[in-house]
């Protein structure tokens, strides 16, 4: 590690209490999605970044009708661009999301308290992914204020968005398609103990069967939509068993999955149900043909009820999220990250590089041909952070280490590719 990086590390250590307070303030602002009232946290974050000394912080409001169509209430994106030298050269985007799933039940602490217990901060969204907002912000601050900025050339875009839980279409995808950001490479929200170079894609379907209601005393005069849906359920569960044979070549990702997550229907206990609806999640492994997967799904559903007279069937695709990666392990981005990880995380071996079965905003950058990696704050596994569960938490030690690694990696990427 050279003297510049030592200065970066020292600056982060000297300012870690401020960074922890910054994260706590973000956690204390509710940003549940749903319901998706996320303009307030975006406006709050703009103020916080300006107070930290970021000179160019834009609050990019999204049209209310578009927000409503996406199932949210209010939304804005945050973009803060920091230039080094004359700004020419490599541009790196750091993208994390500030919207969170609702807290749910089972918390032992206030989900919006940001409480610190035995070296861990607890709160909804602290791991997914408000801690990444803090780490990315302070990594860039270190580059600005640690006395090494004259060694750098290029720019860094902090792109903080607030619709990841509903697909990221109005967040990172919008910023990329409109040309608001156009990075050469990107680091997206992740965890500290692995670099994620791939993730699953996903198809969401709504399947509706419509029959004919009748009095329960005369069921033969009706057409039972729930009975028809039961046949569909059986067909889909049989189909699900065949997916285990489609093995992924990406470490960390096993095979495609299928989950029937929602079901609703019927009128009353004494009425033949005239309608039933299910929602299905079909995960796609990297490289899997989405069109073929959709065709297989539709065939299973249609064949399940083709012999049922009088049933009307509707299949609606409501989401198609592309898979991400795999990004080659020898890419300059991963090489720089791995080198700095080993320097900071002494005695912990090499940085693991793997895929994950979730889908996230990283895919939007990858779709544009931008080399991307998921890396941020957190443990080895999502479940260890209680991500999307009660008592979500991160270790403050991981917050500090991740910030150091990211700052040193940015130093390499904006310093004409030097790796020390």
Image (spheres, rainbow, N blue to C red):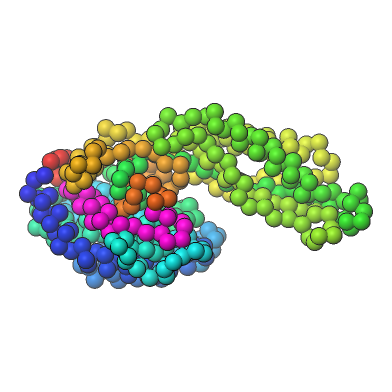
Q: Residue at x 81, y 36 (%)?
A: 307
**Farthest residue, direction front:** 118
Estimate the x, y position of residue 277 in percent, counting from the top left: 69, 51
**Residue 155 appears in the rendering:** no
Q: Identify which residue, 107 or 405, lies in the foreground.
A: 107
Q: Which stretch is magenta?
A: 385-414
- Number of numbered tags placed on the structure image: 0
Residue 392 part of the magenta-drawn span = yes
In the picture, measured across the screen, residue 325 lies left or right of residue 403, that is: right
Picture coordinates of residue 128, whole percent (x, y): 39, 56
Q: Position of residue 86 (x, y in %)?
A: 15, 53
Residue placed at 74% from the left, 44% from the top? 230
Main secondary-structure element of the magenta-colored stretch? helix
For the residue pair 252 and 82, the one nearer the viewer reads as: 252
Give residue 14's quadrant in the image: bottom left
Residue 310 location, quadrant: top right
Q: Nearer the viewer, residue 367 or 203?
A: 203
Residue 420, x across and y down, in percent: 12, 41
- Asked if the magenta segment contains residue 116, the reply would be no
Q: Quadrant of the N terminus?
A: top left
| Residue 21: quadrant of the picture | bottom left
In the foreground, 198 or 318: 198
Question: Does any portion of residue 243 appear in the rendered image?
Answer: yes
């Amino acid at each position: 590690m050279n003297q510049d990086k030592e200065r970066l590390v020292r600056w982060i250590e000297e300012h870690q209490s401020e960074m922890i307070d910054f994260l706590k303030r973000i956690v204390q602002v509710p940003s549940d999605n749903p319901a998706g009232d996320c303009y307030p946290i975006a406006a709050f974050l703009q103020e916080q970044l300006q107070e930290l000394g970021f000179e160019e912080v834009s609050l990019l409001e999204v049209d209310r009708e578009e927000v409503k169509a996406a199932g949210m209430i209010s939304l804005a994106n945050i973009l803060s661009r920091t230039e080094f030298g004359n700004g020419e050269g490599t541009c790196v985007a750091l993208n994390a999301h500030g919207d969170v799933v609702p807290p749910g039940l089972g918390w032992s602490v206030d989900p919006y308290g940001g409480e610190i217990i035995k070296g861990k901060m607890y709160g909804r969204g602290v791991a997914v992914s408000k801690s990444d907002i803090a780490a990315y912000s302070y990594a860039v601050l270190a580059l600005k204020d640690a006395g090494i900025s004259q060694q750098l050339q290029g720019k860094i875009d902090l792109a903080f968005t607030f619709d990841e839980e509903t697909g990221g279409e109005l967040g990172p995808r919008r910023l990329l398609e409109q040309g608001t950001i156009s990075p050469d490479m990107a680091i997206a929200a992740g965890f500290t103990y692995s670099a994620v170079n791939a993730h699953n894609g996903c198809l969401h379907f709504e399947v509706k069967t419509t029959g004919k209601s009748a009095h329960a005393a005369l069921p033969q005069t009706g057409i039972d939509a729930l009975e028809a849906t039961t046949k569909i359920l059986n067909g889909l569960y049989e189909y699900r068993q065949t997916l285990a044979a489609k093995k992924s070549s990406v470490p960390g990702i096993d095979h495609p999955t299928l989950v029937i997550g929602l079901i609703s229907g019927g009128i009353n206990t004494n009425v033949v149900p005239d309608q039933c609806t299910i929602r299905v999640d079909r995960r796609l492994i990297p490289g899997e043909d989405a069109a073929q997967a959709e065709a297989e799904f539709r065939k299973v559903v249609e064949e399940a009820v083709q012999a049922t007279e009088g049933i009307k069937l509707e299949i609606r695709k409501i989401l198609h999220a592309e898979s991400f990666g795999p990004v080659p392990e020898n890419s300059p981005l991963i090489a720089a990250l791995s080198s700095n990880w080993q320097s900071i995380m002494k005695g912990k071996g090499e940085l693991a590089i793997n895929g994950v079965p979730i889908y996230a905003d990283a895919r939007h950058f990858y779709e544009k041909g931008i080399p991307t990696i998921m890396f941020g704050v957190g443990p080895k596994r999502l479940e260890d952070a209680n991500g999307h569960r009660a008592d979500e938490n991160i270790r403050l030690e991981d917050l500090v280490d991740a910030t150091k690694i990211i700052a040193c990696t940015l130093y390499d990427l904006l310093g004409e590719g030097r790796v020390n």
